[in-house]
Image: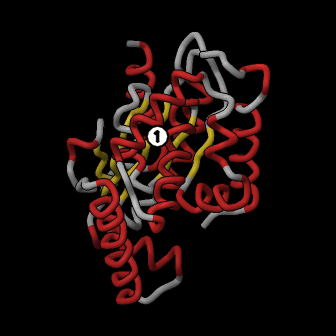
């Protein structure tokens, strides 16, 4: 669940990256971004937060990293008209490239697709700006044409995910199982219906981590080191 402080961090990121002083300019080195796709109940948000801390500490050019989850993106879309605000401060050639990606993703689309398209546009702009970790909302499929983005899939055995959901949401085992399965169906359908992609396809991701025997700090380190190695190439 998103908190007020989460939203404040995301808006601070947007404010810092949408200043007139950078309008029409392109950074000398494109900053990396990360997408995290996850099975329900894997604790991916904890990993994302630890990853942001790791990258802030270990990146050659330290900078603030910000985690955007699906709830924050949609709330910010509603409250702050993010696609326009982000696009107008990016170099013209980058905006054109993103327009091309959106057209390839959607082509002509009905009005009912507006929110999905706006969310995709926001995710593309954020990923292109760099130093963001995008959790969920088919971000791997949406940003796969961007060369600066590293894609992660986080999985775990069903029993472990149900146990975690029971504790976190204070649910019975049956209710937790139903919750996990329903979220999995919803995420799979969202990816298939809107982006014609299979969320379980390992080829969508640069790394797949099984959290059965990995703690969040170790997962963050593994991902972070891989991101930094990719950024040096």
Q: Quadrant of residue 18?
A: top right
Is 9 in front, or is 129? 129
| Coloring scheme used | secondary structure
Residue appearing at x 48%, y 43% in the figure: 217
In the current view of this chain or complex, which residue is farthest to the top? 28
Check disc 1 and report its element: helix, strand or loop: helix
Question: For residue 148, what is the image quadrant?
Answer: top left
Q: Nearer the viewer, residue 228 or 11?
A: 11
Identify the residue at horizontal 52%, vertical 73% (top origin).
168
Q: Position of residue 127 (x, y in %)?
A: 51, 36
Counting from the top left corner in percent of width and height, residue 80 is at 72, 53
Closer to the camera, 172 or 118? 118
Residue 222 at least partly seen: no
Residue annotated with mark 1: 220
Quadrant where the C terminus sits is: top left
Instruction: Answer left or right for 190 relative to 117.
Output: left
Task: Check the picture and name the quadrant holding the N terminus.
Answer: bottom right
Rendered residue at 52%/40% (across/down):
51
The reply to whether residue 196 is visible in this rendering is: yes
Residue 122 screen position, x and y as percent:
56, 46
Report the residue at 58% width, 62% height from top: 71
Above or below, 205 relative to 29: below
User: Residue 45 location, x and y as percent?
Assistant: 52, 55
């Amino acid at each position: 669940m998103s908190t007020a402080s989460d939203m404040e961090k995301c808006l601070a990121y947007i404010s810092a990256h949408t200043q007139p002083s950078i309008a029409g300019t392109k950074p000398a080195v494109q900053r990396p971004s990360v997408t995290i796709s996850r099975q329900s109940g894997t604790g991916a948000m904890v990993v994302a937060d630890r990853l942001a801390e790791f990258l802030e500490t270990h990146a050659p050019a330290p900078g603030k990293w910000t985690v955007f989850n699906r709830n924050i993106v949609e709330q910010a879309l509603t409250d702050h008209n993010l696609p326009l605000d982000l696009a107008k401060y990016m170099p013209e050639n980058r905006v054109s490239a993103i327009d091309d990606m959106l057209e390839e993703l959607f082509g002509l689309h009905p009005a009912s697709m507006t929110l999905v398209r706006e969310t995709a546009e926001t995710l593309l702009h954020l990923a292109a700006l760099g130093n963001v970790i995008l959790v969920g909302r088919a971000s791997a499929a949406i940003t796969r044409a961007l060369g600066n983005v590293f894609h992660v899939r986080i999985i775990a055995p069903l029993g472990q995910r149900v146990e975690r959901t029971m504790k976190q949401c204070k649910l019975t085992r049956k209710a937790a199982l139903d919750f996990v399965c329903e979220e999995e169906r919803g995420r799979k359908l969202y990816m298939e219906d809107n982006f014609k992609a299979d969320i379980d396809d390992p080829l969508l991701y640069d790394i797949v981590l099984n959290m059965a025997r990995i703690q969040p700090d170790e997962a963050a380190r593994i991902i972070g080191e891989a991101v930094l190695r990719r950024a040096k190439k």
